[in-house]
Image (spheres, helix red, strand yellow):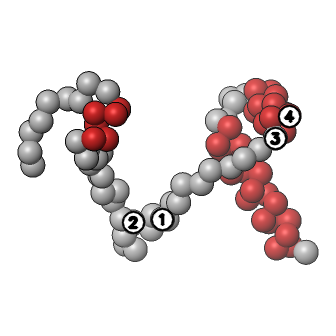
Amino acid sequence: MVVRRKPANVDEFIQEGGSVPQVASPQPSEESGEEEIKGLKMRLPIELLKRVDEVVKSRRPAPSRHQWILEAIYEKLEREIAK
């Protein structure tokens, strides 16, 4: 690995052909029973997100928005499968 000085700005970083080192994430092992996880971006209308946040804040202890959305997805899947 070559050691260089820190670029002064983004343009200099790009011109030098800089890159951000990728850190390998640990792979789940079948023995540990861990699930593989995939990151996902969601685009939601702002009003829907505000409604979700209101409901999240009303629960005690309040789950994270991420946790609440996961719960909603699992509940919807259970309803769909039970049909």
The residue lying at 77 percent from left, 31 percent from top is 53
Indicate the position of residue 10 as horizontal and vertical percent values.
35, 32
Q: Amino acid at mark 1?
A: Glu
The answer to whether the residues at label 4 and label 3 have Cβ atoms under 8 Å apart is yes
Residue identifier under label 3: 45
Residue found at the very far right of the displayed protein: 83
Residue 30, by quadrant, is bottom left
Per the model, the C-alpha gap separating discs 1 and 3 is 28 Å
Q: Name the residue at 81% across, 31% down.
A: 50
Q: Amino acid at mark 2?
A: Pro
Label 1 belongs to which residue? 36
Residue bearing mark 4: 47
CB within 8 Å, label 1 to label 2: yes
Above or below residue 6? Residue 78 is below
Relative height, residue 49 to residue 35 (above, below): above
Q: Position of residue 40 (x, y in %)?
A: 59, 54
The residues tagged by marks 3 and 2 sit, at their Cα atoms, a distance apart of: 34 Å
Q: Amino acid at mark 3?
A: Pro
Position of 7 with respect to 36 (left or right) is left
Q: Which residue is mark 2?
A: 28
Front tag of 1 and 4: 4
Query: Is residue 57 toward the left or the right of residue 17 in the image?
Result: right
- The Cα–Cα distance between marks 4 and 3, rounded to whole angstroms, is 5 Å
